[in-house]
Image (spheres, grey):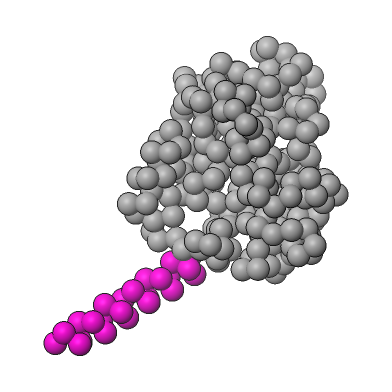
Amino acid sequence: FRRIRAVALAAAAVALASWGIFEGVRTPPTRSVEVVFDDLPAEFDGYRIVHLSDLHCSSAAREPRFRRIVDRVNALEPDLVAITGDFVDGLPADRQDDLSPLRSLRARDGVVGCTGNHEMYWRWDRWCDVLIGFGIVFPEKTGPVEIRRGESSIFVGGMRDRAFFCRREDWRADGAFAGVPADAFRVLLCHRPFTAATGAAEAGVSLQLSGHTHGGAMPLLSLLVARFNEGHVRGLFEFAPGRFLHVSRGTGQWAGFAARIL
């Protein structure tokens, strides 16, 4: 009986791990989230952003996977594509070709992005030029991006990940919107789903797009993830009256922990 139980437990463990890894590496489904703002200019009613995050291009996530993701994004005919960090796990010489399908992303107002902590680990000074060459605009580098519809505008700002800062107190959202009119509608790209620590509400952010948490990855672990991310694990949060944070579950998974369960 003990041997049967041991074999059954081992089989269950293998099945659970296999399922988790499959869920971690498959092309993710599309989730639709509608957010209503009182201060959004009327010309932007129905504006569609495709939010990608945590692509984690690596030896376990190669060019065919990103081609499938790009095809799925383009089929949605977005107004804007926003990629909130952790593009890569590897150097450009090894992973540039695998990530090259991003060149084919299509959106009316282009593709914007911000850095994640993994960009700090993999020579951002080299990857920055590569990703800009793919057509991705980084507001943290260029300054806030203005998007116009008729006489109205919204502004997209971006923050470097906290890993790039020596002091946490320097990691503030207000710096992402230098020169932007005080009453402008502001969209912030920030890899980590922090709003209180960065002063997002004080910076006038109406919508923040973040990732980093991988949706908590699995039960119980998600409780730990929440503790270290201001309680934000996945989905939509109202972090101040009329101000919203959307946390992506992650378009990919870090190869060092590729599993997702439930």
Name the spot of residue 69 as percent of width and height, x first: 66, 59
In this orientation, does residue 28 appear?
no
Magenta residues? 1-23
Q: Residue furthest front?
A: 166
In the visual, does 113 lie left or right of 37? right
Q: Residue at x 46, y 49 (%)?
A: 215
Name the spot of residue 10 as percent of width and height, x first: 30, 79
Above or below — where is 18 with respect to 57? below
Q: Is residue 11 magenta?
A: yes
Quadrant, the C terminus:
bottom left
* Front residue (pair 100, 118): 118
In the visual, does 182 lie left or right of 195? right
* Front residue (pair 214, 166): 166
Q: Quadrant of residue 198?
A: top right
Quadrant, the N terminus:
bottom left
Name the spot of residue 144 as percent of width and height, x first: 75, 27
Q: Determine the main secondary structure of the stretch shown in magenta.
A: helix
Q: Residue at x 68, y 17 (%)?
A: 184
Q: Residue at x 48, y 68 (%)?
A: 21
Name the spot of residue 123 as percent of width and height, x first: 74, 50
In the visual, does 13 lie left or right of 89? left
Q: Is residue 148 magenta?
A: no
Q: Quadrant of residue 192?
A: top right
Q: Quadrant of residue 205?
A: top right
* Front residue (pair 12, 95): 95
Q: Residue at x 81, y 55 (%)?
A: 103
Q: Residue furthest top?
A: 182
* Front residue (pair 37, 99): 99
